Amino acid sequence: MPELPEVETIRLTLMPRVAGQTVEEVVVRETRLRQKVKAEFGVQLTGRRFTALRRAGKYLLFDLDDGRILLVHLGMSGCLATSADRTDRHDHVVFRLSNGVIVTYNDPRRFGCMKIIEPGEGELSDLGVDPLSSDFTPEHLRELCRRRRRPIKTLLMDQALVAGVGNIYASEILFRAGVRPARGAHTLRGREIAAIHAATEEVLAEAIRWGGSSISDYRDGNGNRGGFQDRFRVYQRGGESCGRCGTTIRARPLGGRSSFYCPACQK
DNA sequence: GCACATGTTCTCGG
DNA sequence: CCCGAGAACATGTG
């Protein structure tokens, strides 16, 4: 479910209910996530206060009052939400906070992970530029494209280069920019890179305004669906006609993932 | 049964 | 070193 807009939407909807709250109880019902949840996980968190909720790429960062960070990655099917009363078999971790709010981590495929890190430690230092940050400039993107022969779509999805873009938004961004997914990054002209840069900011911002994309079971921090899935221009629309020019949208695999583009609108 | 799924990480090989 | 292909992870949907 989660690319940058979904993670950001969860952050925005969860923030008012968790910021400043103390963790009163943690129940770990399933430790077998992508990385095993450590036995002392609950003990380390209990009694700690969440001072802030931030995002880096596709990671959620709960800042703790002892300086450490609760790091959450939602993998492919993870949800983090204030929960209803009923429990699901895929509710793996449950937090009870000092304001009475219950936050549940649910993840059927268990590709996500949840761990406590020291500041500056671990996977966060391997992340590329966050496309919502001021460091993401056309010049930065041009530098990333220099001498890289790989397709621009896989470059955009490489978390070590640009942190937060996944398979849905890479296709949507490149449609808006008018660039084919398979174009070699080093072949892009300055105006094309500028268009991709602008489209990245625009598509991600618009998707956040719509509350993310719910193509199967993504929900925000309050359990509500997103709305951007109804505004896809190419993603999952292979065989349909392009809304801009009428040409049939193509679907073809790239880097092991399905990609979608309009052969007329995108060069 | 088969294909496919919003992600990451590994191996193997060119 | 760069990069692609393919597999693996676990579960669900069509």
Image (spheres, coloured by chain):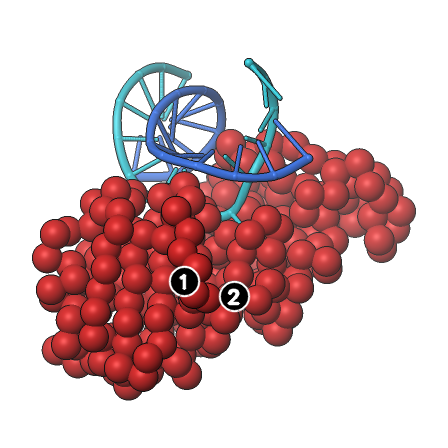
Chain colours: A red, B cyan, C blue
Q: Is residue A124 above or below residue A215?
A: below
Q: Chain of mark 2?
A: A
Q: Position of residue A55 (x, y in %)?
A: 38, 69
Q: Which residue is mark 1?
A: A80
Q: Position of residue A216 (x, y in %)?
A: 59, 49
Q: Amino acid at mark 2?
A: Gly
Q: Is residue A121 above or below residue A111?
A: below
Mark 2 closeness class: few <14, some 14–19, many ≥20 residues within 10 Å: some
| Marks 1 and 2, how far apart at CA | 9 Å
Rendered image: mark on residue A148: none
The answer to which quarter of the image holds residue A195 is bottom right
Residue closest to the far right: A246
Q: Is residue A139 above or below residue A150?
A: below
Mark 1 closeness class: few <14, some 14–19, many ≥20 residues within 10 Å: many
Q: How many marks?
A: 2
Which residue is depicted at the point 26% across and 51% down? A29
Q: Name the side, left or right, on which C5 lies relative to A176.
A: left
Which residue is depicted at the point 15% across and 59% down? A41
Front-most of residues A229 and A24: A24
Determine if residue A115 is in view: yes
Q: Position of residue A215 (x, y in %)?
A: 62, 51
Which residue is depicted at the point 39% across and 80% down? A17
Sooner in the amino-acid sequence: mark 1 or mark 2: 1
Determine if residue A160 is in view: no
Front-most of residues A121 and A22: A22
Q: Position of residue A117 (x, y in %)?
A: 17, 62
Q: Which residue is mark 2?
A: A223
Cβ atoms under marks 1 and 2 closer than 8 Å: no
Q: Chain of mark 1?
A: A
- Name the quarter where the C terminus of chain A is drawn: top right
Say if labels 1 and 2 share a chain.
yes
Q: Name the side, left or right, on which A179 lies relative to A241.
A: left
